[in-house]
């Protein structure tokens, strides 16, 4: 999501990555149950315009150099936040973190924002 901050924008993306069980030999077992759901946060500050992330096969939405640079950056998962045993808890924590990030800004957002 893009959060306006004055004449700049902050882009925030949460990614939930899953990890299969790994044995003592370092072998992953993807056909077995998922062991962890890993929450990552990517935050890009001081963008001069809202970040428009194109669909994987549609690069026609990218119009400026800063959008190209930022679009390449968003493929990064971002910073590790937490590991969870179930995906529902990972989703709930992501929602709570979003609320904490945007609640202080709600007084300065317009209905359109």
Image: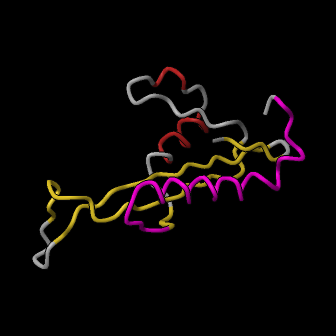
Determine if the magenta segment contains residue 19: no
Q: As displayed, is residue 77 above or below residue 69?
A: below
Q: How many marks?
A: 0
**Residue 6 sits above or below residue 34 on the image:** above
Residue 49 or residue 82, whichever sits in front: 82
Up/down of 6 relative to 54, above or below? below
Q: Position of residue 54 (x, y in %)?
A: 49, 29
Give the residue at the far bottom of this rendering.
Answer: 24
- The part of the image, by quadrant, that contains residue 52 is top right
Q: Quick check: 12 left or right of 37?
A: right
Magenta stretch in the rendered image: 82-111
In this view, which residue lies farthest toward the right?
A: 107
Q: Position of residue 109 (x, y in %)?
A: 85, 40
Which percent across, then down, holds residue 82? 48, 68
Q: Quadrant of residue 38?
A: bottom left
Viewed as shown, does residue 1 lie left or right of 21? Answer: right
Q: Is residue 66 left or right of residue 56?
A: right
Quick one: quadrant of the C terminus?
Answer: top right
Image height of 39 relative to 82, above or below? above
Q: Nearer the viewer, residue 66 or 11?
A: 11
**Which image quarter holds the N terminus?**
top right
Answer whether residue 93 is magenta in the image. yes
Residue located 45% across and 28% down the image: 55
Give the residue at x 73% y 44%.
Answer: 3
Q: Main secondary structure of the magenta part?
A: helix
At x 73% / y 40%, what residue is drawn?
Answer: 48
Pinpoint residue 102: horizontal percent, then vertical percent. 74, 51
Horizontal side, residue 87 vs residue 20: left or right? right
């Amino acid at each position: 999501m893009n959060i306006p901050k004055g004449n700049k924008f902050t882009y925030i993306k949460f990614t939930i990555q899953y990890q299969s069980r790994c044995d003592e030999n370092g072998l992953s077992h993807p056909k077995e149950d998922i062991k962890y759901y890993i929450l990552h946060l990517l935050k890009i500050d001081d963008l001069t315009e809202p970040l428009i992330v194109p669909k994987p096969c549609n690069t026609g939405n990218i119009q400026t150099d800063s959008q190209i640079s930022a679009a390449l950056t968003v493929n990064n998962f971002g910073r590790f936040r937490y590991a969870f045993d179930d995906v529902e808890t990972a989703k709930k924590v992501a929602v709570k973190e979003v609320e904490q990030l945007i609640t202080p800004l709600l007084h300065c957002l317009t209905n359109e924002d």
